Image (spheres, rainbow, N blue to C red):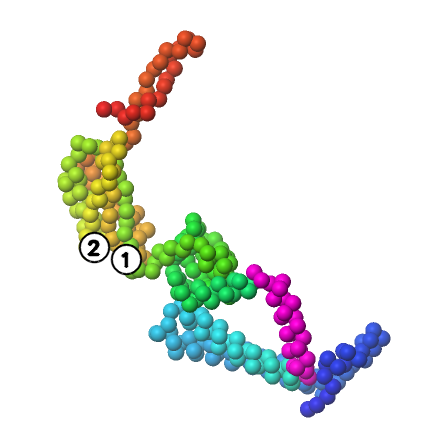
Amino acid sequence: MTGPSIIALLANADAGTASGVLRDLLEPDRAIQLGQALLLLIVGWLVARTASLTAVRLFRARSSPQQRLLIRRGVAYTIMAVFLTAALEHAGFQLGVLLGAAGVLTVALGFAAQTSVSNIISGLFLLGERAFEVGDTVQVDQLVGVVLSIDWLSVKLRTFDNLYVRMPNEAILKARITNLTHFPIRRIDVPLRVPFAIDLDRFEKTLVAVAERAPLCLDEPAPALHVNPPNEDGHSVTFVAWCLGANILQARRQLVPAMIAALRDADMPLAHPRRTITLVNDPRAGDAAPVLDGGATP
């Protein structure tokens, strides 16, 4: 079915012939062409959706969530591009003219959208490097969240207080990123201060027994007590235990109260900062004024 293209009709029309162009578009042949083009778009959307879901199911066992997302989008966009091209040609658009205009427009937009181009290139580096994937928990500078998607221009995160955060790919590429769920197990660090007179061996055995009874703590690597350089208040120590990465928040919430209770039952108090306050008579004030001494009490 042939007929004058829509572009030609609009090019030959002036302000006084707008109604004539509308009549030409509503002619039976033209209306059938537009209807068939619309039908092609609908069929293309259905085919793209079905094909993308089928491709994801085929590669589900051998791909990560991010790879499945890329497969789904790649298949869907490719099929929709084919059907869109066929629909435009069926509707009478001259694709050669459109592509030429698109080329000029692309050059103009390239100068005006340098930031977008930089984000696209940064996104390709992020996808190739695979420092994190969809579903990972990452820390970007001081922000911690779960990766929702890695798109062409940005990375979407959901923080633990349920906020939606969009970060440009360029900023992500330049930032310091910590992937908190890359490895299957995580270490729980509990810093403590204990008096100098305490028996560190007994102290460690008490805490190790607590970690061994904790259901979410792992037996291997074994829990241990790390002794740090002492300070003026006593020994500075760090008790460490291991758990699965997915259980770290719950494991820490169970472990710390159990440690405090066990130390209290064993009559092993923790050290607290102490300061000496000296009262100095100030003749100008007429009363004793407290002065804070920086040294710790013996």
Seen at 39% across and 62% down, the residue is 132
Relative to 87, is 235 above or below? Answer: above
Badges 2 and 1: C-beta atoms under 8 Å apart?
A: yes
Q: Which residues are magenta?
A: 91-115
- Image vertical order of residue 90 relative to residue 230, above or below: below
- Occupied quadrant, residue 85: bottom right
Which numbered disc covers residue 185?
Answer: 1
Q: Is residue 291 left or right of residue 164?
A: left
Residue placed farthest to the bottom in the image? 1
Nearest to N terminus: mark 2 or mark 1:
1
Apparent side of residue 227 relative to residue 173 in the rendered image (left or right)? left
Judge by depth and name the residue closer to the eye, 266 or 202: 202
Position of residue 48 relative to residue 184, above or below, is below
Residue under numbered circle 2: 221
Q: Main secondary structure of the magenta part?
A: helix
Left or right, 51 with respect to 294, comes to: right
Q: Secondary structure at mark 1?
A: strand
For this view, does 70 lie left or right of residue 184? right
Residue 198 placement (x, y as % from top left): 17, 34
Residue 11: x percent and y percent?
A: 77, 78
Picture mark count: 2
